[in-house]
Image (cartoon, grey):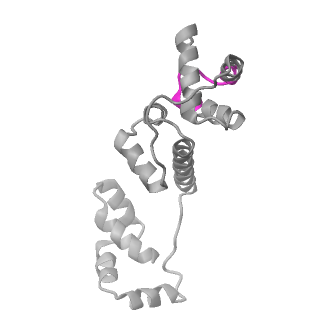
Amino acid sequence: MVLQHLVSLSEAIDDPDQLRELHNSGLTPEVIDRLRQLSAAEMAQLSKMKSRDVVLTLNPDGLLFNLRQLEATREERAKFQYFIRHGASPSMIMRLFRGTSHVHVRQQRAVMGITSTWGRPPVPKSERERRDIEEAWVALSKDMPKSNTHWERERFLMLHKRYGHYSLASLDAVIMTFRTQTGHAE
């Protein structure tokens, strides 16, 4: 399987330096041609041979970087789905997840089986509860950098864990009103 992937990889490389590196590691055009002519069964047979002529080396730093990227992407997707599942409005999602379109939000909601609600989200009727939410938001803001969508997302996640009986859209409405009334732009 690795050999088949290397053949496919060699055919897809456009960068001459990468191709030269591949050739220097032993995957010459002649070897690629011969490997390409093998059937899947022959490729499997080749990989089982006792010869030590086929060696796989890894770039640990590159692999670790790619694994971190994959993990970050997975976490980002999980947070995106959390926001959708817990009632964030499309405008909130597009603000907190840069590059997300209204169409993408709608498609993700459909895939997750979540229906949209129309109109303004309900906010707590109690002035005291709205103030509690605002104070919690300010307290969360003290420990995090300002004006960064990543940290704003994290604050909303923590706020929602504390006030989970409200949708994220409702919490966002409270915070937006608070920002407008007080001039807090964080």
Specify whether 126 is left or right of 6. Answer: right
Where residue 119 sits in the image (x, y, percent)?
A: 44, 31
Q: Nearer the viewer, residue 116 or 102?
A: 116
Where residue 54 sits in the image (x, y, percent)?
A: 49, 78
Residue in the image at 34% along x and 78% along y: 31
Q: Nearer the viewer, residue 126 or 156?
A: 126
Most extreme residue toward the top is 182
Q: Nearer the viewer, residue 151 or 48?
A: 151
Q: Is residue 152 visible?
A: no
Q: Is residue 75 above or below residue 41?
A: above
Residue in the image at 46% along x and 47% along y: 115
Where residue 181 sits in the image (x, y, percent)?
A: 55, 9
Q: Is residue 134 above or below residue 27?
A: above
Q: Is residue 143 magenta?
A: yes
Residue in the image at 34% along x and 44% along y: 103
Q: Quadrant of residue 160?
A: top right
Q: Is residue 18 visible?
A: yes
Image quadrant containing the N terminus: bottom left
Q: Is residue 88 above or below residue 176?
A: below
Where residue 168 sits in the image (x, y, percent)?
A: 57, 34
Specify whether 111 is left or right of 62. Answer: left
Image quadrant containing the C terminus: top right
Residue in the image at 34% along x and 60% along y: 20
Specify whether 145 is left or right of 119. Answer: right
Q: Quadrant of residue 118?
A: top left
Span highlighted in magenta in the image: 139-151
Q: Is residue 185 magenta?
A: no
